[in-house]
Amino acid sequence: MFAILHALGTLVADLFKSRCRLEAENLFRDRALLTWMTRLWPSLIGAVQVVQPETILRWHRAGFKVFWRWKSRNRTGRPKIDRGLRDLIRRMSKENRLWVHPGSMVSF
């Protein structure tokens, strides 16, 4: 219960802090986390690669472009059905005349 009240109090206090102070706190927490992680796993230092912010933006824009190109691709019409499956459906509907709705104009 105390943890929930503490979290709510922190949230309300953060609403009244300046943007500059919040950015400084986030930067400090990120640095502290990275320091702690590299002390636990020293091999992480070798895996780190410095990347410019413009590079990350370029990657993000390229990924976004690919996603929307895929999302808006031309998908007109129904998907194609295998010839054997179509023949099976027709044969089954001919053998089972009760499957056809009485008001439909289907003829085989």
Image (cartoon, rainbow, N blue to C red):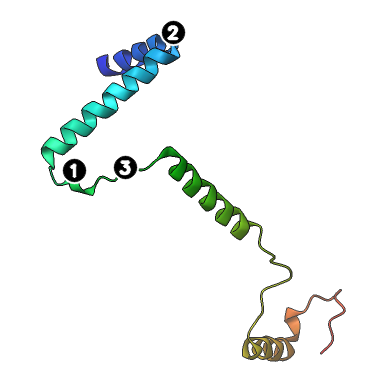
Which of marks 1 and 2 precedes in the sequence?
Answer: 2
Quarter in which the C terminus is drawn: bottom right
Amino acid type of disc 3? Val
Query: Which residue is denoted by mark 2 in the rendering?
Result: 16
Q: Which of 20 and 67 is in front in this view?
A: 20
Kindly indicate whether the residue at mark 3 contacts the one at mark 2 (C-beta within 8 angstroms): no
Left or right: 107 in relation to 44? right
Count all numbered tags in the image, as a single digit.
Answer: 3
Query: Circle 3 is placed at which residue position?
Result: 50
**Can you tell which of label 2 and label 3 is closer to the viewer?**
3
In this image, 71 relative to 99: left or right? left
- Where residue 90 appears, x then y in whole percent? 71, 88
Locate residue 71, reporting x and y percent: 61, 57
Q: Looking at the image, is mark 1 or mark 3 earlier in the sequence?
A: 1
Going by the numbered disc 1, the residue's amino acid type is: Ile
SS label for mark 1: helix
Secondary structure, mark 2, is loop
Q: Using a 10 Å C-alpha cutoff, classify the residue at mark 3 as few (fewer than 14 neighbours), some (14 to 19) or many (20 or more).
A: few
